[in-house]
Image: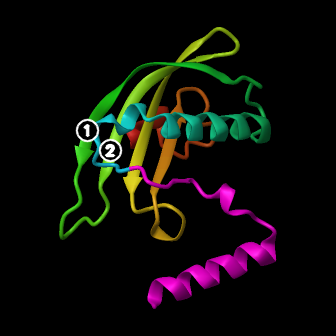
Amino acid sequence: MKLSFKALIVAMMLGLTGWSAEAADYIHGLDASDPGACSDTRVLTKISHRFRHQVRNVPGLPNVEIVNYARLGQSRYKPSDDRHPIARRYCRGSVDLSDGRRRSMWYLIESRMGFVGIGSNVEFCISGFDRWHVYGGRCRVLH
């Protein structure tokens, strides 16, 4: 019952603000405990989509796109337990951008952190593109 009420409130808020559910940063059906999650196509597609939005909407960033992912892998994994209910998989790799440059990238996949607690959330940081240091200097929060 509690989840249904939460879903109703979120649905009402989305309707009132004009936002769509697509704006949520979740991936339904992705298991953050899966070792292959770092190279999951849904994760990389979400990163590409959000990066495109970022470079178009943050002043001072070059208008480039991700054209390729390379050297993807896991840097650490924190499973869920009684004290930490959210499993977290930390990943790293590099991206080739449309300007011909290769940049380092770090990203985090969190289970049960998607829209209304369904699916997995993805956070990412590409070196040189965290203008406001949301993820700390040189993306260190996601290392």
Which residue type does callout 1 highlight? Arg
Find the magenta span and give its range. 1-30
Image point (49%, 61%), residue name: 114
Which residue type does callout 2 highlight? Arg
SS label for mark 1: strand
SS label for mark 2: strand
Work out whether mark 1 precedes mark 2 in sequence or the reverse, and give the earlier one.
Answer: 1
Mark 2 lies on residue: 89
Residue 123 image offset from top left, x and y in percent: 49, 46
Q: In which quarter of the image is the C terminus?
A: top left
Name the residue furthest left: 82
- The secondary structure making up most of the magenta span is helix
Q: Nearer the viewer, residue 64 or 70?
A: 70
Q: Is residue 47 left or right of residue 92?
A: right
Q: Does residue 66 sit above or below 53 in this rendering?
A: above
Mark 1 lies on residue: 76
Q: Is residue 136 left or right of residue 129?
A: left
Image point (27%, 38%), residue name: 35
Residue 110 image offset from top left, x and y in percent: 39, 53
Q: How crowded is mark 1: few (under 14 residues within 10 Å), some or many (20 or more)?
A: few
Q: How many marks?
A: 2
Image point (61%, 11%), residue name: 101
Q: Nearer the viewer, residue 117 or 41?
A: 41
Question: On residue 22, which mark appears?
Answer: none
Name the residue furthest bottom: 1
